[in-house]
Amino acid sequence: MRRQINSDELAFFYSASGEAIWYLQYVEEALCKFYIIIGIHFNCDGINRNNAKKNLRKINQKTLGQLIGLIEKTGRVPQAMLADIKEFNNLRKWVVHNSMRENGQDLYTDSGREHFFQKITAFSDMARSLHNSISTSLMQLVTDSGYTTEEQIMATANLELERLKGNA
């Protein structure tokens, strides 16, 4: 049945789309840090402790696709994680670039709208899962290699949270 999207559905659409983009940025940020740590730990791409911050600023400007290429080139990322990141990037292309063009008309049917919403929600779920996976791998790499301890990381994170709340 064709009908116009109602205000509750439209609010969900905008909220879910914004959430998806927000979580995408968390994944990108985690991947940038992961790449830098891999570079330092395995001597990849000339990255070391002395130039890590400079390289991170440069890497933060890369697109997700470019970042995936850099990470893949190191040969240090498990194939399963790399496959997940590539799948995520393909879905990202739909969410960010092609959803309106390819499926915009689906918002005018009940079944199409439901499918559209499920796809955006799946993207956010995938982003959260991928972010957790990258963060876990990053934590394991830096603690196993002796760069820092989990306690130090958590203490720094808690200080940053307090600063953001205006308590520090």
Image: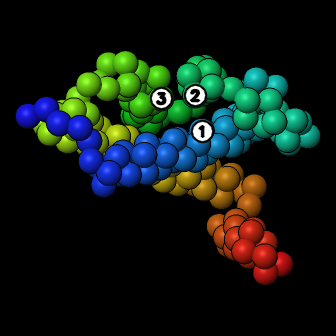
Picture quarter with the N terminus: top left
Identify the amino acid type marked 1.
Answer: Glu
User: Residue 114 appears at what percent x and percent y?
Assistant: 20, 41
Element under disc 1? helix
Front position in the image: 143 or 106: 106
Mark 1, Cα crowd under 10 Å, few <14 / some 14-19 / many 20+, is: many
Tell me which numbered mark, 1 or 3, is placed earlier along the sequence. 1
Q: Are marks 1 and 2 in contact (CB under 8 Å)?
A: yes
Question: Residue sitting at 26 percent across and 25 percent down?
Answer: 105
- Is 41 left, or right, of 11 in this rendering? right
**Alpha carbon separation for disc pair 1 and 2:** 6 Å
**Which residue corresponds to mark 1?**
28
Residue bearing mark 2: 64
Colour logic: rainbow
Q: Is residue 140 above or below residue 25?
A: below
Q: Earlier in the sequence, mark 1 or mark 2?
A: 1
Q: Secondary structure at mark 2?
A: helix
From this viewpoint, is residue 52 visible?
Answer: yes
In this orientation, which residue lies closer to the viewer: 61 or 9?
Answer: 9
User: Left or right: 43 with respect to 35?
Assistant: right
Answer with the quarter of the image where residue 34 lies: top right
* Chain-order first, disc 2 or disc 3: 2
Residue in the image at 38% along x and 25% along y: 100
Q: Is residue 20 above or below residue 60?
A: below
Marks 1 and 3, how far apart in space? 14 Å
Rendered view: 38 above or below 144: above
Q: Are marks 1 and 3 in contact (CB under 8 Å)?
A: no
What's under tag 2, amino acid-wise? Answer: Leu
Residue 96's label in the rendered image is 3
